[in-house]
């Protein structure tokens, strides 16, 4: 073989390998792709490759760099995400000290505490062991729902743990725990495990969380259904903020309990007006310490993934999203012109957003699934937001302020009053709808400027306009 021919073949092979690696690096899949009727599914996506197996000796310096997956992707560790989102700049947030975040998931994972301890050691986070000034982790298991009566549905929760397991929900549980803890490292965590993924079983767990915590984080859901306004909406609105993820299929929802069958729609319970609905972004940082370089919508729809959003077909427009609230935002059409089809106006989602694209996701540790993975989804955006909001709740207690029963009314009022102060506007990306100036059906109001919210918008420090 001539040298020139050999070099051509070698170059072609190298180009093919590079293309393969690039495609591999970008590939991600939904960990739990379907849910049977009457069941919810988590919104967690995993990259198709495990993280470098020797991550522990390198720690955060490894995953807060883009040396592994290549251009256009990023793996965040807790320290990098704290830096980009300003988790350490919340006045008197104290890492959420003294407050409790409830996380609700299905089934049981026996290595929760040991995996969390391993992750905390590698990432330099406080342990959740209650030793000294460390926060606590409490795990409870919940029984099967026995009635259609909201808010408890006859579910009881106790320290007697469940026995059922599910690898997809296991990955979800560890993601929720690790990144709520990362954003509020001194907050206590109450891990509520529903007996399975049944709708009422999980909602009973949510009510238990509302009754025993300061904020509740939920990264799961399903298609809307006709009884949500008359029955299941009664789960929420008990004086504690409840967050739900908006879903990972753009302006569509998965139906049928199998395959890739999608229809235009929004995810419930995120569409309930009584909860804060969290969408997803693509977050690329720069500098040291890390700061935001660009942040756009997590684009895509259907089986390709993307930030969930759109208009409810059952929930009417809540007062805090009315034209009088949003019409004052420069460049914003006002929600009644967005969600008016077929007898509206309807509830529009999401309300807010944070990092969700698995290509700019986070490092998670889950020994049951094999170790470290890069994961994302609105299942990431929700606990990240819950942790940041838990710090605001802690700050309010420090300043003698009352508990916030819901974040939605003050968020929308704050957006009208001084939108660019409180929010980073996500103006590019598409999930079937286009992101744009002000509120949109891809990322809602955008990403919270969390220190600004804590300073003023929730009454800690008043600064005149």
Image (spheres, rainbow, N blue to C red):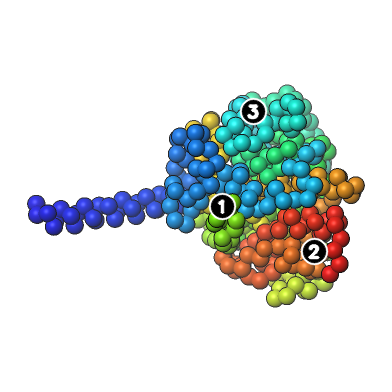
Marks 1 and 2, how far apart at CA: 31 Å
Q: Is residue 290 left or right of residue 2?
A: right
Examine the rendered structure and indicate whether residue 120 appears above or below residue 375: above
Give the mark nearest the N terminus, 1 or 2. Answer: 1
Name the residue tied to disc 1: 288
- Quadrant in which residue 119 is drawn: top right
Name the residue rendered at 70%, 27% in the picture: 129
From this viewpoint, is residue 408 visible? no
Name the residue rendered at 21%, 52% in the picture: 10
Q: Is residue 343 left or right of residue 116?
A: right
- Quadrant in which residue 327 is drawn: bottom right
Binning the other alpha carbons within 10 Å of mark 2 as few (below 14), some (14 to 19) or many (20 upward) gives: many
Q: Assign a secondary structure to mark 3.
A: helix
- Quadrant in which residue 266 is drawn: bottom right
Mark 1–mark 2 CB contact (< 8 Å): no
Residue 270 locus on image (x, y percent): 70, 53
Tell which of 427 and 287 is nearer to you: 287
Q: Assign a secondary structure to mark 1.
A: loop
Residue 291 locus on image (x, y percent): 60, 56
How many numbered discs? 3
Give the mark nearest the N terminus, 3 or 1. Answer: 3
Give the mark nearest the N terminus, 3 or 2. Answer: 3
Tell which of 29 and 9 is nearer to you: 9
Rendered image: mark on residue 414: 2
Residue 299 locus on image (x, y percent): 55, 61
Q: Residue furthest left?
A: 1
Name the residue tied to disc 3: 113
Q: Residue furthest front?
A: 288
Binning the other alpha carbons within 10 Å of mark 1 as few (below 14), some (14 to 19) or many (20 upward) gives: few
Q: Quadrant of the C terminus?
A: bottom right
């Amino acid at each position: 073989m001539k040298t020139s021919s050999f070099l051509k073949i070698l170059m072609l092979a190298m180009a093919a390998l590079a293309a393969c690696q690039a495609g591999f690096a970008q590939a991600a899949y939904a960990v739990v792709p379907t849910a049977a009727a009457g069941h919810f599914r988590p919104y967690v996506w995993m990259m198709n490759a495990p993280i470098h197996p020797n991550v522990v000796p390198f720690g955060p310096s490894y995953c807060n760099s883009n040396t592994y997956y290549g251009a256009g992707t990023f793996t965040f560790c807790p320290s990098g995400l704290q830096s980009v989102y300003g988790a350490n700049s919340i006045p008197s947030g104290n890492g959420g000290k003294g407050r409790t975040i409830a996380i609700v998931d299905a089934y049981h994972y026996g290595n929760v505490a040991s995996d969390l301890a391993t992750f905390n050691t590698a990432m330099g986070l406080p342990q959740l062991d209650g030793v000294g000034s460390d926060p606590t982790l409490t795990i409870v298991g919940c029984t099967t729902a026995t009635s259609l009566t909201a808010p408890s549905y006859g579910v009881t929760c106790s320290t007697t743990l469940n026995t059922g397991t599910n690898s997809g929900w296991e990955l979800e549980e560890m993601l929720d725990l690790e990144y709520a803890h990362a954003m509020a490292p001194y907050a206590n965590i109450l891990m509520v495990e529903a007996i399975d993924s049944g709708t009422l079983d999980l909602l009973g767990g949510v009510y238990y969380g509302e009754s025993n915590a300061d904020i509740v984080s939920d990264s799961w859901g399903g298609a809307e259904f006709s009884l949500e306004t008359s029955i299941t909406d009664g789960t929420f609105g008990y004086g504690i903020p409840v967050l739900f993820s908006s879903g990972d299929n753009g302006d569509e929802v998965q139906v049928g309990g199998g395959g890739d069958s999608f229809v235009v729609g929004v995810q419930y319970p995120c569409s309930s007006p009584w909860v804060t609905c969290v969408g997803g972004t693509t977050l690329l940082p720069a500098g040291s310490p890390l700061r935001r370089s660009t942040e756009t919508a997590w684009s895509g729809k259907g089986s390709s993934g993307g930030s969930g959003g759109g208009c409810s077909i059952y929930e009417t427009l809540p007062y805090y999203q009315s034209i009088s609230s949003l019409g004052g935002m420069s460049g914003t059409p006002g929600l009644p012109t967005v969600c008016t089809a077929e007898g509206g106006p309807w509830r529009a989602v999401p309300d807010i957003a944070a990092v969700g694209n698995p290509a700019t996701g986070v490092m998670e540790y889950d020994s049951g699934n094999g170790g470290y993975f890069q994961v994302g989804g609105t299942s990431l955006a929700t606990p990240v937001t819950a942790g940041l909001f838990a710090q605001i709740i802690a700050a309010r207690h420090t300043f003698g302020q009352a508990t916030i029963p819901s974040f939605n009314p003050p968020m929308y009022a704050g957006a009208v009053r001084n939108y660019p102060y409180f929010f980073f506007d996500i103006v590019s990306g598409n999930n079937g709808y286009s992101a744009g100036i002000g509120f949109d059906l891809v990322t809602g109001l955008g990403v919270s400027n969390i220190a600004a919210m804590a300073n003023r918008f929730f009454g800690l420090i008043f600064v005149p306009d």
